[in-house]
Amino acid sequence: MKDLLLATTNAGKIKEISEILADVPLRLLTPADFGLDLVVSENSGSYFGNARLKASQYAAAAGIPALADDSGLEVEALGGDPGVHSRRFSPTPSATDRDRCQYLLEKLKNIPRPWKARFVCAVVVRSPSEELLNGWGECPGEIIPDFRGDNGFGYDPIFLVGGVNKTMAELTDIEKNALSHRARALQAALPALYAFAQA
């Protein structure tokens, strides 16, 4: 069975990705398995660019292929912000997920609803020397002013998933792993992931 490093230390992402890829015959490893604590500057200006930076640096450090994703929230009324800067959107460096949500709601408070938005995600798998595969996913919805649900992270509690009267944080793991932007990006990459696993 081939090894694949998940190039993130975010426990929520590791859980999600591991569940979505549970049927792919790969041994999924984490940075903790290698004693890695990398700080990657996500300064490419694009989702795919940031995912490539992370995958490349983790693959080089571990010496095995690495899967990285970069995701963001794009709010129509804010011209697509926070976008690739979603995690660093708040001007406070030590901001928590809730702080970032509050800061976003503050930006939107004088703009009429609905606050249409979408989550997007780019996934890249790289070996230490080359890009092996990639995938893209989107999840449309809208921002709401109330925090709902606790099964998520980031902006999940204020993102109402399109076509479902639930926020991303109110979805069960099974629902989230079918509907989320990350799930859709990984699903788009599944045929190539199976081919990689069996090569």
Image (spheres, rainbow, N blue to C red):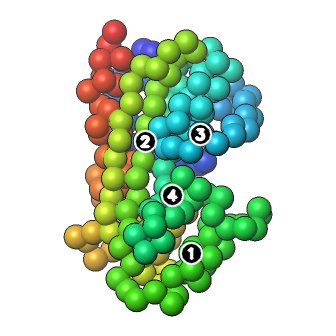
The disc, 2 or 3, on the residue closer to the chain's N-terminal end is 3
**Helix or strand or loop: what does disc 3 sit on?**
loop
Tell me the distance, in whole angstroms, between the alpha carbons under discs 1 and 2.
Answer: 22 Å
The disc, 1 or 3, on the residue closer to the chain's N-terminal end is 3
Can you tell which quarter of the image residue 174 is in?
A: bottom left
Residue type of the residue flagged with mark 3: Ser
The disc, 1 or 2, on the residue closer to the chain's N-terminal end is 1
From the viewer's perspective, is 180 left or right of 28? left
Tell me the distance, in whole angstroms, between the alpha carbons under discs 2 and 3.
Answer: 13 Å
Tell me the distance, in whole angstroms, between the alpha carbons under discs 4 and 3.
Answer: 13 Å
**Helix or strand or loop: what does disc 4 sit on?**
strand
The disc label shown at residue 104, or none: 1
The disc label shown at residue 44, or none: 3
The disc, 4 or 2, on the residue closer to the chain's N-terminal end is 4
The answer to whether residue 28 of the structure is visible from this angle is no
67 and 129: which one is in front? 129
Which quadrant is the C terminus positioned in? top left
Tell me the distance, in whole angstroms, between the alpha carbons under discs 1 and 3.
Answer: 23 Å
Q: Which of marks 4 and 2 is in front?
A: 4
Q: Are marks 2 and 3 in contact (CB under 8 Å)?
A: no
Q: Residue visible at 53% across and 31% down?
A: 52
Residue where numbered disc 2 is placed:
122
